[in-house]
Image: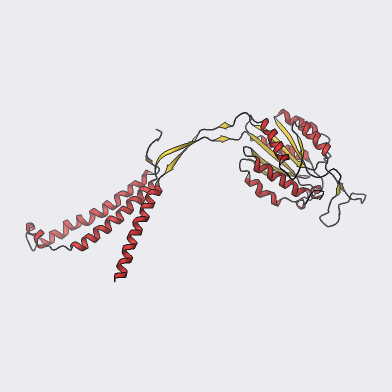
Amino acid sequence: METVGFHFEQPIWLWGLIFPLVLWWLPRAQLREDYYDRLQHYADKHLLPYLIIHNNEEGVKRRKAFLLWTMLWVMAVIAMAGPRWDYTDIDIFEPTTGVVILFDMSRSMSAQDVRPNRLARAKQEVKDFVEQAQNLKVGLIAFATVANVLSPITEDRWSLLRILPALSTDLVRLQGSRLSNALDKAQRLFLSQPSGNAKAIVLVSDGDFQEPNLSEQVRQFRQYGINLYVIGVGETQGVPVASPQGGWLVDQQGRRVISKLDKTGLELLAQAGGGIYVTASYRNDDVETILEHIKQNQPPSMVKKNPIRVWHERFYILVGLMMLLLLYRFRQVQRVRWRK
């Protein structure tokens, strides 16, 4: 039976209300059984009420103290039982679009044709994307020669932001970048998503991939409903790439390695993947453009789960009354001490 009115969350605590009743009954039972029986040796029972002198003032103090602590105990027990009434039904919506970000960490991303360098610019692009992807599930894969899953597809987008500062090209031992490996791992991440959900891959890179079958691989992804979007980082003029040991990277002939943004190649990849290409900028236009395109391919509505009933807890009312009673009690104690 569904609870719709006043009730207690943990009614088992109400058994604690018996405790003050026991404390009140035991001394009285013992007094009546032992005390009056002994006094009957000295006087008849019907004369005892006239012969016993009661200390009324002391009895009143004890009764007041007992009443105060009994009230505190009762309120504490009821508060622990969790009184609640009225509620709010909250509809839960599950994002139906999963996005996997492929983050290029190859050595060329340390080039400084954009300030401070391509890697820092790429981090900012990912940060902007995650912050604005309000209704999307997001995963993160960092890749160079080898791809590594840094975060599964999740609604906890802020965990991705905590990972970004640790990403560096110094973590990459082997030069080069293999996008196909990262694409395969992204496809595996999408296997955990419901079949009806929209899926998208966002590639953040400077391009220049030396893999001949990338376009064909991306086209096959479209058969599974996975679109590819690309954010290009860098300039098309080309600049030398710094070496971690100092100086510049050189090829086998001893010439400086010149890296430039492969805008044409990245545009072709985005076209083959059914997405769009944008060049990273210092404004949010690039990220907003991709997000708008993703939302257009999103299902018309979110998946609505069963609503969650959130009850309004009222235990704090009793806690507030307890604090007032304790304050009153402590003020009385302080007055007695000052008089003494």
Instruction: Give percent across and percent down for residue 327.
Output: 36, 59
Image quarter of the C terminus: bottom left
Q: Is residue 73 left or right of residue 259?
A: left
Residue farthest toward the right in the current orientation of the protein: 253
Query: How many callouts does the rendering have?
Result: 0
| Horizontal and vertical percent position of residue 109 | 79, 48
Identify the residue at horizontal 34%, vertical 46% (top origin): 14
Residue 244 in picture, x, y percent from top left: 81, 55
Observer-nearest of 84 and 196 = 84
Q: Whole-percent x and y of residue 289? A: 71, 36
In this rendering, the answer to whether 305 lies above or below 107 is above
Is residue 148 visible in the rendered image? The answer is: no
The quarter holding residue 66 reads bottom left
Q: Residue at x 38, y 52 (%)?
A: 320
82 or 23: nearer the viewer: 82
Residue under the image location 31 percent in, 53 percent down: 71
Using the image as rendered, state which of residue 88 and residue 95 is in the foreground.
88
Which residue sits at x=64%, y=34%?
97
Q: In this rendering, would 142 be left or right of 332?
A: right
**Relative side of 192 to 282, left or right:** left
**Left or right: 130 with respect to 321?**
right
Q: Residue furthest bottom?
A: 340
Image quadrant in which the N terminus is located: top left
On the question of residue 49 being in view, the answer is yes
